[in-house]
Image: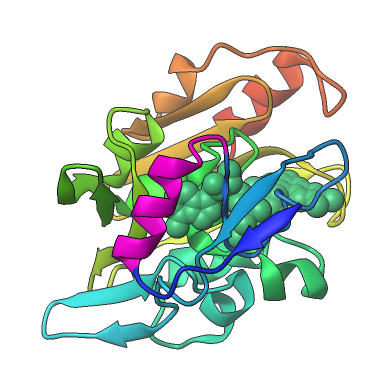
């Protein structure tokens, strides 16, 4: 694999135009995983920030912030710190980024429920220029591009929970709540956000992590 290292966002975007098959390489935990093979990858570590900082009303988290950095930072929303700890391996948490996690739109994503319940703004770079979207739109595939940062409301109350066979097994289900906003994920079954009972919208399916009925029951008693 050839790894290209752009020094700026503009350079990263022009490389992507020339190499449309090349993934962005953030923490690399997916790009490097077994079963993936790419001729080229675009390392965005020099182009995209990893800082976590407060402004008057918001918390900004750079897309390159690792799950471990988010977990340890007192500036991160609590619901996101809870969710970052769902990734059981320290090595993986040190490499895996919030941008790379969101970009996969996984229904067993460590951060998916916490992101949906807190619904930050996602700042993106697209071919047309800088754009903003809600995380719900991004995760639903209604917005796309290179994620630059997430902007959360400050002082968000909330918590995230997970259930799996063990702390190191993939999550069967997860949930998060921020005030009156709830979000849920179930493996192989999608994710949903809205009111407390929005888990009912999921199309529950059996898989190695549990039966559809098992996952439906777990979410019905999660909060
Ligand atoms: C053994 C193992 C188990 C795993 N289990 C889980 C799991 O249960 N749940 C889970 O959520 N994840 C899991 N993962 C995947 C992974 O570790 C995390 O999802 C991680 O957060 C991905 O981030 P990354 O920075 O490593 O992504 P990368 O591997 O760098 O990139 C992944 C994808 O995201 C895109 N991308 C990266 N950054 C951006 C950006 N800023 N803007 C737009 N697109 C971007 C890339 O183009 C690429 O397609 C697992 C990985 C491994 C190796």
In this rendered view, identify the residue nearer to me: 3 or 71.
Answer: 3
Residue lying furthest front in this view?
18
* Residue 10 shown in magenta: yes
Q: Position of residue 11 (x, y in %)?
A: 36, 63
The residue at the point 66 percent across, 61 percent down is 3
| Residue at the image position 83 percent from the left and 29 percent from the top | 209
Q: Main secondary structure of the magenta part?
A: helix
Q: Is residue 53 above or below residue 57?
A: below
**Residue 136 is inside the magenta segment:** no
Q: Residue at x 13, y 77 (%)?
A: 57
Which quadrant of the figure has residue 49? Answer: bottom left
Q: Position of residue 58 (x, y in %)?
A: 19, 75
Region rendered in magenta: 9-21
169 left or right of 80? right
**How many marks can you see?**
0
Coordinates of residue 124 in the picture (x, y in percent): 27, 53
């Amino acid at each position: 694999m050839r790894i290209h290292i752009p020094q700026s966002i503009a350079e990263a975007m022009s490389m992507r135009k020339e190499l449309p098959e090349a993934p962005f390489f953030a923490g690399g935990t997916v790009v490097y995983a077994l079963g993936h093979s790419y001729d080229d990858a675009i390392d965005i570590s020099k182009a995209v920030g990893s800082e976590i900082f407060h402004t008057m009303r918001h918390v900004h988290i750079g897309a390159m912030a690792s799950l471990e950095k988010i977990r340890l930072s007192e500036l991160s929303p609590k619901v996101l710190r809870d969710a970052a700890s769902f990734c059981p391996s320290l090595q993986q948490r040190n490499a895996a980024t919030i941008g790379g996690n969101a970009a996969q739109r996984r229904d067993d994503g460590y951060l998916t429920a916490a992101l949906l319940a807190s619904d930050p703004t996602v700042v993106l770079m697209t071919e047309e220029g800088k754009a903003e979207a809600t995380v719900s739109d991004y995760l639903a595939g209604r917005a796309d591009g290179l994620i630059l940062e997430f902007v959360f409301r400050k002082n968000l109350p909330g918590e995230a929970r997970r259930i799996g066979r063990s702390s190191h097994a993939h999550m069967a289900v997860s949930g998060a709540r921020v005030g009156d906003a709830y979000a849920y994920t179930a493996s192989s079954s999608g994710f949903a956000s809205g009111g407390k009972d929005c888990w009912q919208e999921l199309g529950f399916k059996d898989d190695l992590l549990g039966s559809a009925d098992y996952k439906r029951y777990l979410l019905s008693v999660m909060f």
